[in-house]
Amino acid sequence: MAKVKGSVTVNTERCKGCDLCVVACPSEVLELTNEVNSKGYNFARVKNPDECTGCANCGYVCPDGCITVYQIKI
């Protein structure tokens, strides 16, 4: 079976900082920033990109569809 590495992108302007993605990530790839977007929300960002397994838990729980997960076979 091929190994899979993941990559996550977050649409920071759509993110409202609900923290669901951060809690759902088993690899602690995401975190909330101290910065705010144009709507005044602290948004999620990728803090450990090399730890992403591509499980897509973060994307499944995001209520606003801000997260895209890519899976790359290695």
Image: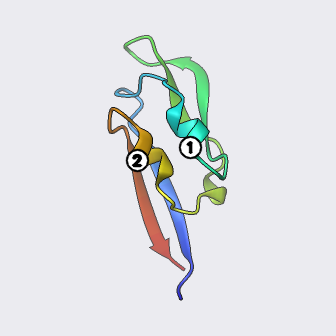
Classify residue 30 by image quadrant. top right
Q: On the rendered structure, is 44 left or right of 15?
A: right
Please say which color scheme the image uses: rainbow
Q: Give the SS element for disc 2.
A: helix
The disc placed on residue 5 is none
Looking at the picture, does residue 59 appear above or below residue 21?
A: below
Residue extending farthest to the top is 40
Q: On the image, numbered disc 1 is attached to which residue?
A: 24
Hey, what amino acid is under mark 2?
Tyr
- Dot 2: within a 10 Å radius of its alpha carbon, few (fewer than 14), some, or many (20 or more) residues? some
What is the x, y in percent for residue 45?
Answer: 54, 36
Tell me what residue is drawn at x 40 percent, y 47 percent. 60
What is the x, y in percent for residue 28?
Answer: 67, 46
Pointer 1 and pointer 2: residues touching (CB < 8 Å)? yes
Hey, what amino acid is under mark 1?
Ala
How far apart are the two marked residues, 1 and 2, measured between alpha carbons?
Answer: 9 Å
Tell me what residue is drawn at x 64 percent, y 51 percent. 26
Q: On the image, numbered disc 2 is attached to which residue?
A: 60
- Dot 1: within a 10 Å radius of its alpha carbon, few (fewer than 14), some, or many (20 or more) residues? some
